[in-house]
Image (cartoon, rainbow, N blue to C red):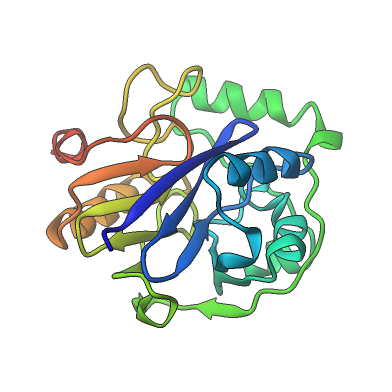
Amino acid sequence: MSVEIFPIHVGFDCCYVIKDKGVIMIDGGATGCVDDFTKGLEKISIDPKEIQLIVITHGHWDHIGAVKEVQEITGAKIAMHQNEKGWLEEGVAPLPPGINLWGKMFSGFMGLFPSLIKVPRTNVDIILDDNEFSLEDYGIAGRIIPSPGHSHGSVSLLLDSGEIFVGDLAMNKFPLRIGPGLPIFADDLSVVKESWKQLLDQGAKTVYPAHGESFSAEVMRKAIS
């Protein structure tokens, strides 16, 4: 059986369901978007209970707001980096800092609507650290790799076949960006670039961002050069 990748649009985000010998999910979307998730699963004929693991790429509100509901529907374990698990467990919703003028304006605009930025609390089952985490036990030929920069606890999921799921370590969606490339939000852009060097060195071929369509990893090689 070859790996199957299913994008599921959950609000402004794109979550991914990966099916091989097992089934896992990447990210959970924002609060109020759980119906998008269930409808997306219906379209790809996957029972929610098939999902064994939810990998959270990072702890910003639009990636974890619906995780509690998704976990209740699926019964899946939640994996998240130790640096940000408290954001989900304590219901914290920090806004990412902008790294260019547009990013700063966008982040400032979101700050005007705090009522939209909610994170229902739930526990993290698997606490990731700065070591790689194999997905073999979940029937997926791949691993979770620490990739800080966008946030201190960002991680990416790299399949052995070269597909890399990076959360917001790259973006490819208007109005965030016109075309694929580096994120407009980051804790440290230099660390973003260093993470990308490591991911490319480890065999990343096709990038699957949380915002926008997939694209060739060669775009990122040029972006950080």
Query: How many numbered badges does the structure rendering display?
Result: 0
Q: Residue 22 at x, y = what percent?
A: 44, 70
Q: Is residue 116 left or right of residue 130?
A: right
User: Between residues 113 and 1, which one lies in front from this camera angle?
Assistant: 1
Which residue is found at the position 65% from the left and 32% from the top?
A: 11
Above or below, 174 against 72 in this view is: above
| Residue 84 appears in view | no
Q: Position of residue 42 (x, y in %)?
A: 62, 44
114, 161: nearer the viewer: 161
177 shown above or below 222: above
Q: Looking at this view, name the residue that lies furthest to the right.
A: 115
Horizontal and vertical percent position of residue 177: 41, 21
Question: Residue 179 in the image: x percent, y percent?
Answer: 33, 20
Q: In front: 179, or 4? A: 4
Residue in the picture at 44% in, 76% down: 138
Q: Is residue 41 above or below residue 50?
A: above
Q: Quadrant where the N terminus lies?
A: bottom left
At 31% from the left and 27% from the top, the residue drawn is 180
Task: Please give the name of the residue rendered at 39% of the width and 45% of the height, measured from the top-left corner.
Answer: 169
Can you see residue 220?
A: yes
Q: Quadrant location of the C terminus? A: top left
Q: Is residue 63 left or right of residue 7?
A: right
Residue 75 position by quadrant: bottom right
Residue farthest along the bottom direction in this orientation:
137
